[in-house]
Amino acid sequence: MRPHLLERHSAPTIALIGGVIAVLSSVLVSHFCIWVTGFQPSSWLFITTMMILCPALIAQPMIYFYAKALHEVARQRRALQEANTKLEAALGEVRELSGLLPICAWCDKVRDDAGYWNRVDAFLKKHTRAQITHSICPACRSQQFASLIPKN
């Protein structure tokens, strides 16, 4: 998203430009008012001076603080977008099992949410990021392959 014009420039720069615009516009307005109302030259100088000084003194601080607030809002918006991006990435990586896991006492199959019984390795592969490998523990090896192991 492209930053707003006021977000691309510093607050003092914006205040200076705004002050210049305020003074120029007040000069134009004051000369127009003097021309329309037909003021005498003696009052013309006082009125013109007041119409130039008032906007120049009032507009710059107002524009400065407004621009400063815009910069702070833009900074906080960027920080919030970065935090949301990080949180979405972290949420995408989180896949964990929680709660009770119904498992058969005899065949060690696991019941899923749909009521189907699956092998433990297939269930873990589907619901976690764990990589499953198969191996034989020493107790099962000696029990299952007892006939193949030579006896001394």
Image: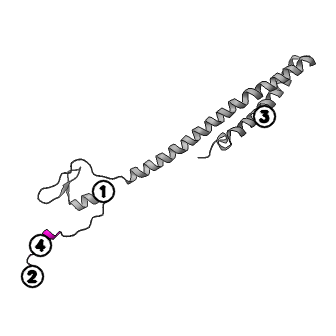
Q: Does the image show residue 43?
A: yes
Q: Which residue is mark 4?
A: 142
Amino acid found under the numbered disc labelled 4: Ser
Amino acid found under the numbered disc labelled 1: Thr
- In the figure, is residue 151 to the left or right of 132? left
- Residue 128: image tag: 1
Q: Which residue is mark 3?
A: 20
| Residue 124 drawn in magenta | no
Cα distance in 3D space between marks 1 and 2:
41 Å
Amino acid found under the numbered disc labelled 3: Val
Q: Categorize mark 2 by other alpha carbons within 10 Å: few (<14), some (14-19), many (20+).
A: few
Cα distance in 3D space between marks 3 and 2:
100 Å
- Residue 150: image tag: 2
- In the figure, is residue 120 to the left or right of 146? right
Mark 2 vs 4, N-terminal side: 4
Helix or strand or loop: what does disc 1 sit on?
loop
Dot 3 and dot 2 residues touching (CB under 8 Å): no
* Residue pictured at 80% horizontal, 26% vertical: 53
Q: Is residue 30 above or below residue 63?
A: above
Quadrant in the picture for residue 41: top right
- In the figure, is residue 76 to the left or right of 11? left
Mark 1 vs 4, N-terminal side: 1
Helix or strand or loop: what does disc 2 sit on?
loop
Cα distance in 3D space between marks 4 and 3:
92 Å
Cα distance in 3D space between marks 2 and 4:
11 Å
- In the figure, is residue 125 to the left or right of 144? right
Mark 3 vs 1, N-terminal side: 3
